Amino acid sequence: MRIAAIVLCGSIVVVLAGCAKSASGGDDASLNESEAHAHFAARYYAGDVARGQVIFETNCSTCHGSGGRSGGVGPSLVDESERQDLSRTIVWIENPDPPMPKLFPSPLSERDVADVAAFVQQIK
Ligand code: HEC
């Protein structure tokens, strides 16, 4: 059941990303595939902040500091929501510029990225 739901969800994302690409005039028409995908993810799944925090401490805090507040190798993520919104944050985590490592699709799943992005968005 769970596997069926994941497969179904995956195909809906693909279909919608396809629609977004072929739509004319709308905002989504200017997005590339990974952006359209993140746009969809951000709009329909808000992300679990508490789960995202655990993922952050395990995978991100070595470079961004505990809670993303102090930085180190990477910048502090305080007020990240003022620099980029949830869907941009998802796009970035899925396809970062070096030296930030690409942690998607492994070890982070799509849901992990959405959750950790939701956590990052609320760092003040
Ligand atoms: C090996 C160190 C490293 C790890 C691990 C890492 N990052 Fe980064 N991150 C960076 C660096 C360096 C930058 C700045 C890259 C640039 O500006 O080109 C960055 C930039 C970012 C930014 C954009 C900040 C901004 O406003 O410019 C976000 C958001 C971010 N990281 C989130 C995360 C998340 C979430 C994780 C864990 C899933 C993570 N990072 C793991 C090093 C890291």
Image (cartoon, grey):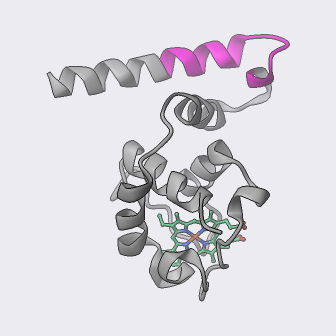
Residue occupying image coordinates x 38% and y 58%:
50
Tell me how many marks there are: 0
Residue 17 is left or right of residue 75, and the answer is: left
Residue 20 belongs to magenta span = yes
Q: Is residue 107 above or below residue 114?
A: below
Q: Quadrant of residue 123?
A: bottom right
Question: In the image as oriented, which residue stretches furthest toward the left?
Answer: 1
Q: Considering depth in this image, is 89 or 36 the residue closer to the camera? A: 89
Q: Quadrant of the C terminus?
A: bottom right
Residue 47 relative to residue 87: left or right: left
Tell me residue 114's x, y (percent): 47, 46
**Residue 83, x across and y down, in percent:** 78, 59
Provide the residue span drawn in magenta: 14-28
75 relative to 93, above or below: below
Q: Looking at the image, which is closer to me, 6 or 51?
A: 51
Screen quadrant of the N terminus: top left
Name the side, left or right, on which 118 lies relative to 81.
left
Task: Single out the residue that lies furthest toward the right.
Answer: 25
- Where's residue 5, x and y in %? 26, 22
Q: Residue at x 71, y 66 (%)?
A: 79
